[in-house]
Image (tube, rainbow, N blue to C red):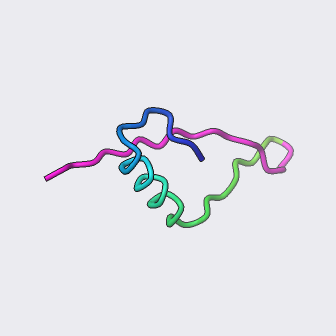
Amino acid sequence: MEVTKGVSKELDAEALRVIKLSPRWNPAIGDNGSPQRAKYVLPISFTIV
C-alpha cells in the first residue's frame, strides 16, 4: 500500500492505519477463473474540526 497524494505524515499514517484495519478484499478473477492482479485507488477525505 502507498499514499499517492499525501497531506502530512500524520494524516498519511492514519489513512494507512484505517485501510489496514479493513476486511481482506477478494482478488479480481480473470476469464480463466484464476486470481488477477488489480490496482485500486481509494480516495479518503478527512474533516478537521
Reply above or below: 41 against 21.
above
Farthest residue toward the top? 5
Camera-side residue of 6 and 39: 6
Using the image as rendered, state which of residue 4 and residue 31 is in the foreground: 4
Badge count: 0
Relative side of 1 to 28, left or right: left
Residue at the left extreme? 49
Name which residue lies at 42% across and 47% down. Answer: 12
Tell me: 42 left or right of 36: left
**Can residue 45 be found in the magenta stretch?**
yes
Q: Residue at x 19, y 50 (%)?
A: 48
In screen coordinates, is 31 left or right of 18? right
Picture layout, residue 35 above or below residue 31: below
Q: Is residue 24 magenta?
A: no
Q: Which residues are magenta?
A: 32-49
Please give left or right for residue 35 compared with residue 5 in the image: right
Vertical placement of 48 versus 24: above or below?
above
Determine the main secondary structure of the stretch shown in magenta: loop
The location of residue 14, given as percent across then percent down, is 40, 56
Q: 11 or 33, which lies in front?
A: 11
| Residue 7 coordinates in the image, percent (x, y) | 35, 37
Residue 34, image x and y in percent? 84, 50
The residue lying toward the viewer, choosing from 6 and 44, is 6
Residue appearing at x 50%, y 64% in the figure? 22
How far from the left and from the top, in percent, is residue 28? 70, 48
